Amino acid sequence: VITEEIHNPLENDVSIISFSCEDPDVFVPTPITIPGRGSGRIRISYNPLTVKKPKDDIKLSVHSKELGEFAYLLSLSATEASLDGTMRFDTDLGSKTVQTFRFKSYGTTQKDAEYDCKIKGTEFTIQKSVVTPVAKPGSDGVDVSLDICYEPSNLGAVRDTLILRSRGRAVLYQVALVGMCRKPKRKGPFEVVPMKID
């Protein structure tokens, strides 16, 4: 996201009413009001959902009825997402623990906002899929939460990876999962109440 300042030399307030761009993943929220003899900033967002090669001289035009057209040349690129952090779990054998993974969904269509959830091993479990609300173009995305359960079957450490992939354009989230299973703790004491049997 970048911002650009626009000056209004007129006495009255003016509005930025629309924009056009050669790249469909560029978005400028409109309308924007700029005060008379003042200035305002436009917010230019680039939210591609796939890896894209660098592109230069992409034309963006921002339109005002009173001030006319403001033209910009953009340089755009989108690289593959890196690992989105590490989640660490710690519990005893015979127990389980749950943590919440939070991410942003930028899907602007229903298909882009549907994700398949995959973990290779069996120590960690998660729901198979999640459907998120559709994000508004140019927004900061939609907050999404998923619960991950770690229920170990062996002592020691285990590693795995959570992969979230959009069913639409290939949005990919990857999170490293690290679990540590310790010896079971003694539970109790439990009170046993004698029962009278007739």
Image (tube, helix red, strand yellow):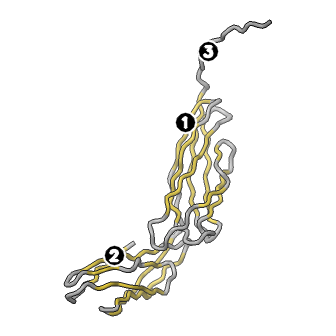
- Is 5 on the left or on the right of 44, as rendered? left
| Residue placed under numbered mark 2 in the picture | 3
Of pointers 2 and 1, the one earlier in the residue sequence: 2
Q: Which mark is residue 141?
A: none
Query: Foreground residue, 103 or 74?
Result: 103
> In 3D space, how far apart are the residues under numbered discs 1 and 3 (Cα atoms)?
25 Å
In which quadrant will I find the N terminus?
bottom left
Asked which secondary structure carries label 1, the reply is: strand
Label 3 packing within 10 angstroms: few (<14), some (14-19), many (20+): few
Label 1 packing within 10 angstroms: few (<14), some (14-19), many (20+): some
Evaluate if marks 2 and 1 touch, with contact meaning CB atoms under 8 Å apart: no
Q: Residue 179: x, y in percent?
A: 58, 40
Looking at the rendered structure, the kind of residue marked 3 is Phe
Q: Residue 56: x, y in percent?
A: 45, 84
Q: Which mark is residue 190?
A: 3
Asked which secondary structure carries label 2, the reply is: strand
Residue 10 occupies which quadrant of the picture?
bottom left
Q: Residue 98: x, y in percent?
A: 57, 41
Query: Foreground residue, 193 or 77?
Result: 193
Q: Nearer the viewer, mark 1 or mark 3?
A: 3
Q: Residue 104: x, y in percent?
A: 50, 60
> In 3D space, how far apart are the residues under numbered discs 2 and 3 (Cα atoms)?
64 Å
In which quadrant will I find the C terminus?
top right
| Residue placed under numbered mark 1 in the picture | 90
Residue 159 occupies which quadrant of the picture?
top right
Looking at the rendered structure, the kind of residue marked 2 is Thr
